[in-house]
Amino acid sequence: MSPAPGPSTPLQLLSSVSQFVELRSIVLRKASTEASVHPEDRAANWTYKQRHTVRHELLGDRNLLRLYPAFEFAAYAAEAPSSPVATLDAEYALTYELKSEANRETSALQVFAEVNGPFVVWPYWRELVQTVTGRLGLAGVVAPVFNVDIKALGKSAPPESPGDGSAAVPTDKGSSQSR
């Protein structure tokens, strides 16, 4: 599918891909955690920060698109806000089949990756955060709902050029909870 003449909005780019894909698989590729918190020295107030990045890979010979959303979570004690007491990192792989009508331009695939990858995986990430933080002694942190910043879409997309779409798009999310 050729995009309409002139500049396309992020929503037009997103639509030019999302209408013509079918999700085939979601896989947790890797995960790691580290903690220095112990149940006997828990802080009363925790601060949590998380961010994610996304890269994509077009496997044109097989009409497949792979998205690789990666997430980072860190918990900080109120008395030591610069040094995390627990971290969790994970990367997922989503595989989509592209129909022939799908826009395969780098900018369209990047916007699709920025929105769709984290959005689809977010429930899996939230469950992983809650489960792992509970086992680390942080009483099971509930990650916030995923929000899409429409105004920021496509701003990090590379100019049209051949490539693997590996530009990472960070989105920071932070929250505080008292325990």
Image (cartoon, rainbow, N blue to C red):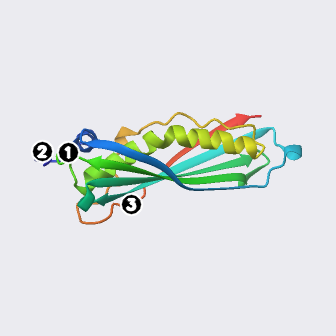
Task: Find residue 127 and report its image quarter.
Answer: top right
**Dot in front, 3 or 1:** 3
Q: Give the percent coordinates (x, y) of residue 164.
A: 32, 64
- Look at 44% across and 40% down and name the residue there: 120
Left or right relative to 172: residue 54? left
- Check contact, mark 2 vs mark 3: CB within 8 A: no
Q: Which mark is residue 8?
A: 1
Q: Which residue is mark 2?
A: 4
- Look at 37% across and 45% down and name the residue there: 24
Direction bottom: furthest residue: 162
Q: Give the percent coordinates (x, y) of residue 91.
A: 52, 54
Q: Give the percent coordinates (x, y) of residue 139.
A: 75, 37
Left or right relative to 136: residue 130? left
Query: Circle 2 sits in a helix, a strand or a loop, which is it?
Result: loop
Query: Circle 3 sits in a helix, a strand or a loop, which is it?
Result: loop
Q: CA distance from mark 2 to mark 3?
A: 24 Å
Amino acid on which disc 1 is placed: Ser
Count the labels in the image: 3
Q: Give the percent coordinates (x, y) of residue 149.
A: 40, 39
Q: Residues within 10 Å of mark 2 (few under 14, many from 20)?
A: few
Amino acid on which disc 2 is placed: Ala
Q: Which residue is mark 3?
A: 167
Quadrant holding the C terminus:
top right
Q: Residue 54: in sight, yes or no?
A: yes
Left or right relative to 110: residue 82? right
Q: Residues within 10 Å of mark 3 (few under 14, many from 20)?
A: some
- Check contact, mark 3 vs mark 1: CB within 8 A: no
- Quick one: label 2 or label 3, which is nearer the N terminus? 2
Left or right relative to 30: residue 105? left
